[in-house]
Amino acid sequence: MMLRLGLTGGIATGKSAVAAMLRELRFDVLDADSLARQFIEPGQPAYDEVLREFGTSILDSNKSVHRAKLAAIVFADPAKLARLNAILHPRVEAAVIRQFAEWSRNGARDAAFVEAALLVEAGYLKHLDGLVVTWCRPQQQLERLRARGFSDNDARTRIAAQLPMEDKLRHATEKIDCSGSLEETRKQVEALAAKLRVNTT
């Protein structure tokens, strides 16, 4: 039986690194945030609806959505962020359900994952058998975002736009502490992988 698991965590807490490790360990991992980005490309399902909602000022010279411009709008206004999520989340949720079903039909064993920053907020938990949450210290989140080029204000705004870390951790069936070295994180992921393979055989 294939477990349907979520992988989430606050921005810059190590979620993407853990997803990469799970892929290296031969687990299927769907990047739902990447799906959302695809859905707002020209000709894709949400493109026209996003333009109607936010206007053509968010486009670049190629008529593609300029993600930084869109982010600047929605992260400055919770109501606009909620509207963008209302456009994208149902489409992403349907794609996630389809992908899990396909993996199951194709004989996937042990577990498969959907990775997304807003798994809890978007209400995807009802489709999952468990949730892995990555975490680190709040100061580390800020430092990592600054290292990515975020201003202090933008970093704090992005963190504040997500569910508080302690709330995400309350939903966790497994927790990965990403406050240490990559090797320390890898050991936790390998232990999780071994546990999943024992529990589903």
Image (cartoon, helix red, strand yellow):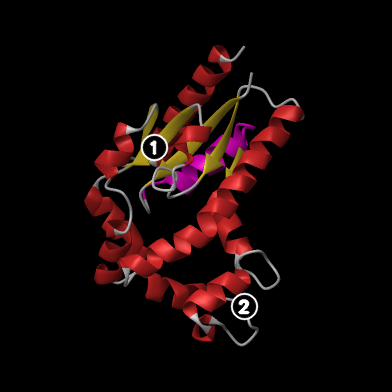
Q: Mark 2 points at which residue?
A: 64
Numbered disc 1: secondary structure: strand
Q: Is residue 199 above or below residue 134?
A: above
Q: Where is residue 177 in the image (x, y as percent from the top left)?
A: 34, 36
Q: What residue type is labelled 1?
A: Val
Q: In which quarter of the image is residue 76?
A: bottom left
- Which residue sits at x=22%, y=53%? 139
150 left or right, relative to 66: left
180 left or right, relative to 71: left
For the record, the magenta segment spans 13-28
Q: Is residue 73 above or below residue 161?
A: below
Residue 66 seen anywhere in this rendered image of the structure: no
Residue 26 seen anywhere in this rendered image of the structure: yes
Q: Quadrant of the N terminus?
A: top right
In depth, the one of 181 and 64 nearer the eye is: 64
Q: Quadrant of the C terminus?
A: top right
- Total tally of numbered discs in the picture: 2
Q: Mark 1 points at which residue?
A: 133
Q: Position of residue 197 (x, y in %)?
A: 58, 18
Mark toward the start of the polypeptide (1 vs 2): 2
- Which residue sits at x=70%, y=28%? 104
Could you classify mark 2 by the number of other residues whose Cα lies within 10 Å: few (under 14), some (14-19), or many (20 or more)? some
Q: Where is residue 12 in the image (x, y as percent from the top left)?
A: 37, 53
